[in-house]
Image (spheres, rainbow, N blue to C red):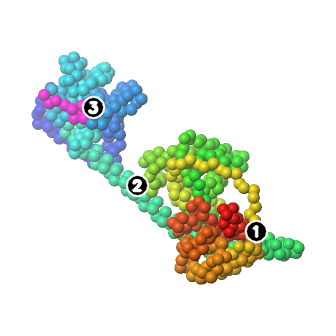
Amino acid sequence: MPPEEPVTSAARLRERDVTIRYLRLINESKGLPGLIQASVEFFQQQSGCEAVGIRLKEGDDYPYCEARGFPRDFLLVENQLCARDAGGRVLRDEAGLPVIECMCGNVISGRFDVSKSFFTTGGSFWSNNTTRLLASTTEADRQSRTRNRCNGAGYESVALLPLVMAGERLGLLQLNDHRPDVFSRESIVFWEMLTDQLSVAVAKFRADEARARALEQNAESQAMFLQAQKLGVVGRLAGGIAHDFNNLLAVIIGLAQLLEDQVHDRPKALADAREILAAADRAAALTKRLLVFSRRQVLAPAVIGVNEAVQGALPLLRPALGAVVGLEVSLAGGLPCVRLDPDQFQQVLLNLALNAREAMPGGGRLRIETSLLERSKEVLARHPGLAAGPHVLLAAKDSGPGIPADILPHVFEPFFTTKPKEQGAGLGLSMVYGFVMQSGGTISAFNEPGGGAVFELCFQAVDQPAPRTAAPSAERPASGSKTILLVEDDAAVRRFAARCLRLAGFEVLEAGNADEALACGRQAWPRLRLLVSDVVMPGLSGTELARRLRAMVPGLRVLFVSGYADDALSRHGLLKPGVRLLAKPFTPAALTNAALEILQATRSEGQD
């Protein structure tokens, strides 16, 4: 509207028509980007201005969201309104708010003086001659330091109208023209009325976007929760089956080994015994993987450096990847240590390498990175439930095609595999998942933009250095004939274990539960030297039984045996240094050697 146009009924009708058309434009807009683009085009047509732009808040600043008619160089230098230091960081005032410069900053921040003719009561700025305005006013009159880039670009007519909703500064509408005298106070009041409608629409669309993001995040969190529940149920089922199966395997493997020793001069029987052992070993490996997934494996955690562990595993990883998959390693310096089972962690790295190789049959690259975890929103979204404190992050990234969306939720499930039945059991990634969770960490699988799968493992840091590794002793435990109290509720396992110990020269007292063991202890306490006990039994646990027997027999040594290490083991301190735990299934040699080592330690400490 030119300034000389009188406010007539015709002008009012035109304003009403423009208003109706703009409200229709708002109602027909499907989203914020479409609304802003259409609004800029609308205001340019209706105002007749050469250049129109809309700034919207983005973080601390208010960059152009949409602009028409401005030179590219002008938009580049004027895009940022926040004052910044030499390093590009936003400067802040004493209240901690960002310092927003120039007249745009005045309008957005609400700095204006209605006694000045170039400000309106609504907080807008306008001028029909910026050259005269700059020459006739001081910086104090203009409320802040002005950069004068609009005038420097030759724009004489400039109008800046705030977008405000419920006290929130959303941005501004900017109208520029090289011609002087484009605006009148009446036209500015009219544009302010339209920008009020624009502010309501912007606020509504942003609220809709926020709700949609919240719903999406809630849906993702719900899906992750349900997936964790499903994996937990499957893990408990797998752990229970594996525990019972280990009892059977302990008998099968043990008796097959004893049979092998007895038929060494009978080739056919020896071959049969070895075939039984080979099948049992494969079954034992399968149950071990199930125990890893179910977080019930027997771990021997130690304070280790993740970088050192990765470097130690490289001789295994490179051959596993084959000739067509390259390996890159990027290890951040100065990382704190973590508490992990080093052997199992090495197996985790190997499984990740094998998975990457399967994902890139035609060749590619696997990159293993370590870093100190930065708790960004993206990382926290991928690792819900992350414990407080510093964490070490290990990421394995491949250059393959990524994990299909329908497969991604299932990658950690046991027996889930995309390979043919005869080519794998699908337990590799489930073992990785089980180890990480049992170790108190978190794990996430996702795809990088453009392809490539990423597995992120986070482990809580410990405030202590990794201990130096002592050289192993070459001394062989001596045999002996001490009395052992064997407590095992599974009769077949008890008979097999007792036979192994007796063949090694021990006197063995057998008990099927804690009550029988306590009765044996009361009768045989003078000669009792070692308790070999299952952990989880009906009635008293193995740990409580050991405590009571030690009260009867001072100096009694203990060897615990278990088919899995569940939460009870940690609660009762079985994994503390100095506590011996033998995992099922065990061989006769493993059982007798463990007993001999414990008793030899007794002699070396001067006990008898």
Q: Residues within 10 Å of mark 3 (few under 14, many from 20)?
A: many
Q: Is residue 152 above or below residue 185?
A: above
Q: Please name whichever residue, 43 or 354, is drawn nearer the observer in this view of the structure.
A: 354
Residue 506 horizontal side relative to residue 162, left or right: right
405 relative to 25, above or below: below
Camera-nearest label, 1 or 2: 1
Q: Which residue is mark 2?
A: 217
Which residue occupies 32% across, 47% down?
206
Tell me the distance, in whole angstroms, between the alpha carbons under discs 3 and 1: 87 Å
Identify the residue position indicated by label 1 in the image: 479
- Dot 1: within a 10 Å radius of its alpha carbon, few (fewer than 14), some, or many (20 or more) residues? some
**Main secondary structure type of the part rendered in magenta:** loop
The answer to which image quadrant residue 430 occupies is: bottom right
Q: Amino acid at mark 2?
A: Gln
Which region shows up in magenta? 106-115
Q: CA distance from mark 1 to mark 2?
A: 63 Å
Give the residue type that dot 3 points to.
Answer: Gly
| Three-letter code for the amino acid on which mark 1 is drawn | Ser
Give the residue at mark 3.
105
Q: Decide which of 6, 58 is in the foreground and name it.
A: 58
